[in-house]
Image (tube, rainbow, N blue to C red):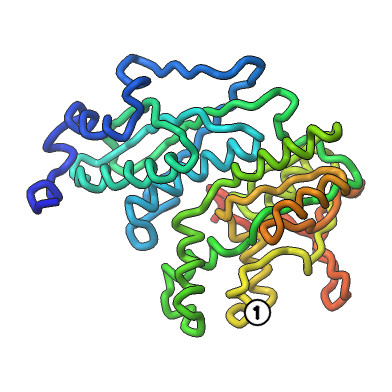
Amino acid sequence: MNSELSSLKVQDIGEQGLLQRLQRFCSSEIIGDDAAVLVTEPEQSLVVTTDVLVDGVHFSNVTTSPEDAGWRAVAANLSDLAAMGASPLGITVGLGLPGEMRVSWVERLYQGMTECLQKYNTPIVGGDIVRSPVTTLAITAFGQVHPSQIIRRSAAQVGDAIVVTGVHGASRAGLELLLHPEFGQNLNNADKTALIHAHQRPHPRLDVLPLLWKILNSSSFLITGMDSSDGLADAVIQICRASGVGAILERSQISLPTAFEHWLTKEQALEYALYGGEDFELVLCLPQEPAYDLVQQLGQSAAIVGRITSESTVMLHDEKEKFPDQVLNLSQGFQHFNH
């Protein structure tokens, strides 16, 4: 890209000029009218989710390139669809931009979105662009799911196993390394790169859904769940509140990145896993036998970390009794508008 193009600003080409440049990232068969028309398969329910990301809150040029910001924005929405059991159909993009924003930054943002979307055969089907004093990105994602396969937060049953995919704490660790490079001096380059990549390029766990449906087809039971975008503790607490139950999590069963072993204390590692957020894994509650079957099929990328109880609390337990039981709450995780 020559210097003239790289210095081009949004205010230089205006709304229509920018829209023309961004159309190449969208589905030409769908865009062009006042609204998109998405066709769902017979006997499917439409699932809709929206996330708003604000410069300085959800991304910044210190920790996130435009491409990474686009990828993460898409991944967050597709993760919400996966948490509902839905397959993606398309997304719309609402973009608020200062007039002095470089056009190249916007195009790189869309490039990152497209790179993530292509992995899941999902198009950009429309959106809107407005002038704003702060860069804001609002994505609405559309998906479909058979009504019998909808995953909700409110169906957990006493005795259910709690299955968690992937590892937790990696995204928080990656963010800390980006903000404080000196923090990980005793980490090798491969571990540093992996943790930073976990923060900048998370993967929504849509790959888990076919395994779930295969297990569900062999027996009849409800699957409860959500994603862990706000932290593992938050996800379990939200599920328990919605279902009117409690839970016990086993400290030793929570999967952590191997890089934590010689870098963080056990308490720091656990804090990152429980409250760090933005790991975009799935937290699922289902009967013990199918839960074990799911973990076996996912291998190292899943673990049974606890069980649903009739109590009203979510308790962190140590079977080795080195640590006292700890009641988990939402106050330690990130909440908008909290000081």
Residue that lies at the very extreme toward the left in this rendered image: 4
Residue 324 in the figure: left or right of residue 24: right
Q: Quadrant of the C terminus?
A: bottom right
Q: Position of residue 138 (x, y in %)?
A: 42, 36
Tell me the crowding category of disc 1: few under 14, some 14 to 19, or many 20 or more residues within 10 angstroms, Cα based: few
Q: Residue at x 73, y 55 (%)?
A: 329
Q: Position of residue 241 (x, y in %)?
A: 78, 42
Q: Residue at x 71, y 53 (%)?
A: 164
Residue 330 visible, this orientation: no
**Which secondary structure, mark 1?**
loop
Q: Position of residue 315 (x, y in %)?
A: 82, 59
Of residues 235 and 24, which is closer to you in this image?
24
Three-letter amino acid code at the position of disc 1? Thr
Number of marks drawn: 1
Residue 177 visible, this orientation: yes
Depicted 273 relative to depicted 103: above or below: below
Q: Position of residue 229 (x, y in %)?
A: 59, 49
Of residues 230 and 35, which is closer to you in this image?
35
Residue 105 in the figure: left or right of residue 233: left
Residue that lies at the very extreme toward the bottom in this rendered image: 186
Residue 53 in the figure: left or right of residue 22: right
Depicted 1 relative to depicted 170: above or below: above
Residue 58 in the figure: left or right of residue 97: right
Depicted 38 relative to depicted 23: above or below: above
Q: Which residue is the site of mark 1?
A: 265
Classify residue 14 by image quadrant: top left
Depicted 182 relative to depicted 330: above or below: below
Q: Residue at x 33, y 30 (%)?
A: 26
